[in-house]
Image: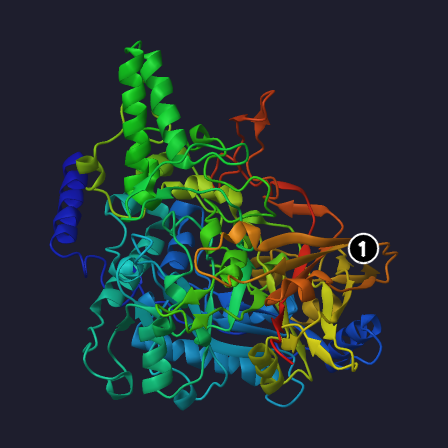
Amino acid sequence: MRRLVVAVVALVAVLAAAGGVYWFGAQGGWFGAEHDAGVIQGKAIPEAVIASRVAATAAAAPAGDEEQILFGDLHVHTTFSADAFQFSLPLLGGSGAHPLADACDYARYCSALDFWASTDHAESITPLRWTRVKESVRACQKIAGNDANPDLVSFIGFEWTQVGRTPDEHFGHKNVIFRDLDDDKVSARPIAATGNGGILRSSKGMSPLVPLKDFSNRQHYFDYNTFASLTREVKDCDANTPSDKLPTDCYEAAARPADLVRKMIDEQKLAPLIIPHGTSWGFYTPAGTNWVKALDPGERPEKFPVIEIYSGHGNSEEFRSWNEVVTAADGTQSCPQPTKDYLPSCWRAGEIILERCLKAKIEAGECEARAATARQSYVDMRVSGLLSVPGAKSEDWLDAGQCTDCFLPAFNFRPGTSVQAGLATTHFSDDGAQATRFNWGFIGSSDTHRARPGTGYKQVDRHENTDAAGPPNSDLRNLLFPQGADNDENPNSRSLTREEIAKFPPLQTIEAERQATFLTTGGLAAVHAANRSRAAIWEALQRREIYATSGQKILLWFNAVDKSGAKTSMGGRVSAREAPVFEVRAAGAFKQKPGCPDFATAGLDEGRIKKICSGECDNPSDVRSRIVRIEVVKIRPQAAKGEALASLIQDRFIVHECKDEGNGCTFTFSDPEFAAGQRDALYYVKAIQEAEPMINAERLHCERDANGKCVKVQLCFGDYRSGASDCTAPAEPRAWSSPIYVDYAKGG
């Protein structure tokens, strides 16, 4: 028997080494099957349910406001995305495939959304999968109806997953959403990113050791390897042929935002909504990245009118003046000193090496030199800097790299690419004649990888409603992380050399262990629309009368009123010599009841509700949570090259304490400094709701010494070590309005 096992292992290894494309087959059965989009099981929602939602919003609205507030999720992945498929595997504690049909049923019955979009990674959508995406989204819409009052509006989209190794090469991820569902109104094929983003296409699949180690679950791994092999099989499109002249069965890619815009808008004559997201998420964003190059007119920044400010990967809103790295004029980078509020990860790398070195009783001067080398090695390794300290545990990094005073910040926070930094940045032409700025509207979304649009309605089932994932036992963890994250019996007292570091790929999954404690349920996109139709939702997105929430269905209105009484809604622009009067109104989300409402239990059977909703649906009571305060943010975009961003961003320009007794909070304000400053400004508001338990709200559970330094952390892992805990802690949910842009009217 032993010889037989050895022979089988050897045969599998040989087949894998010999290209590996078909070593698990590509058709079905024991050797792996290609998954389809699944079967939608839910029916249309009763009209009375929709009418009650409309009435509830109308009851809280300001007098005279007749628009509806609708909630949606424009960032949803299914197991047509390579990373989502990986998360579904037993190796990472996954529960199996999450097809598009699940997303449709979830949006309608679990989270009770009004709209959603499918945005699987273009890098892993084959021509067959693209056909299935379109067919499934159309099937979801057919159930809802295509008239002016559908119960759910479904959009087709994809994600362009660009990753640069250096700040100069990095532009980041973008979701691409199409208004209509007809073939001639959507891209002929998803357009992928080149470079490191292509890792989602080039995966070689699971090692042969994985199904042998986890034999009872072998079929899942066989299916994934078939998925990976079929993804790689698609031939590349001819890079010199215009997008509208290419066949539909090739793999098309764009290197830069301008290329993506050119291919879809100029060549295919489409008009998609292109939405940047995860901009401050340091898992893939190189330290020191900023917005200047993205604002170059050649990159077509005007074609990115909406930004996702919050998702299940954290909050990208807030700017901080500390630096993750110091970038010299020639582009070289070095490690900065820590500050009271921020410990650079590169600095912590040096501390770990220094501690090990001194413990090994090596001469202090030599240890200091090794620490300096470790700091620079971390900087040189960029987003994979963790590998510069061999054998380090996730806990060893303490709170390094994190924004410790932000609201649910993205992991390894990058303040230079925060939304506030983007709004404060101006790109000036060489002759100074042209100034380019972003004019964003804000949305939130989930970035779910489990086909669950709108996961923030209840803070339950962390492993399914967030992207936290990890091995279910120590054996599989050791297989996944062969370097041994916990093996520091004899820790190395030096960092890896640059030559050793260069052998590693640019992204390393081991950092995901630490990241799991930063993953939350997702946000929502809210629109002020004339009605529930596809056209009305799209028009609201286009005019940026939209806002973001941290997942709860908070109601928010924000308008500017001039001397004549004319109103400009959030997302709009006015020109004036004096600041207008701003009106704000917010009402908290309805508090949730346990279980699911009657229409959900009537529309889906108990087993499906348990599987795709974790047994809990959006089930609002008739009592709203209190709004505790409104915070006003004022930003003055750069008026001259080199102006420091910190001096231009006033995050808590005004703070209004609310006395909400269940009816919401209303107040007005103006800015007498605007006229005196004689420069452009923008204003947006944050409606802060009373605290409630939220998943991973306490990121690190830091224990601090008398000087406030973090000396010990307790992480909430995505694997067996944290078990089934939802890791909740009190946090204040919120909504972010889109800005109102006020241009200073010169002359007259």
Residue pictured at 41% horizontal, 30% vertical: 348
Indicate the quadrant where residue 21 lies.
Answer: bottom left
Residue 608 appears in which quarter of the rendering?
bottom right
Relative to 248, residue 630 above or below: above
Q: Residue 580 at what x, y percent from top left?
A: 73, 71
Label 1, on which residue?
626
Q: Residue furthest front?
A: 747
SS category of the residue bearing label 1: loop
**Pick the front one: 174 or 644:** 644
Please give left or right for residue 179 compared with residue 558 in the image.
Answer: left
Quadrant location, the C terminus: bottom right
On the image, the x and y values in percent for residue 342 come to 50, 36
Q: Residue at position x 43%, y 80% from top? A: 134
Q: Residue furthest right?
A: 661
Q: Is residue 342 above or below residue 194?
A: above
Query: Residue flagged by tag 1: what amino acid is it?
Result: Arg
Q: 530 or 261: nearer the eye?
A: 261
| 577 up-or-down from 277: above or below | below
Q: Is residue 163 visible?
A: yes
Indicate how the structure is coloured in the image.
rainbow
Quadrant including the N terminus: top left
Q: Is residue 533 above or below residue 371?
A: below
Residue 699: x percent and y percent?
A: 56, 40
- Residue at 82% x, 70% y is 60
The location of residue 603, given as percent across then percent down, is: 66, 72
Q: Quadrant of residue 615?
A: bottom right
Left or right for 403, reference 362? right
How packed mark 1 is, by other alpha carbons closer than 10 Å (few <14, some 14-19, many 20 or more), is many
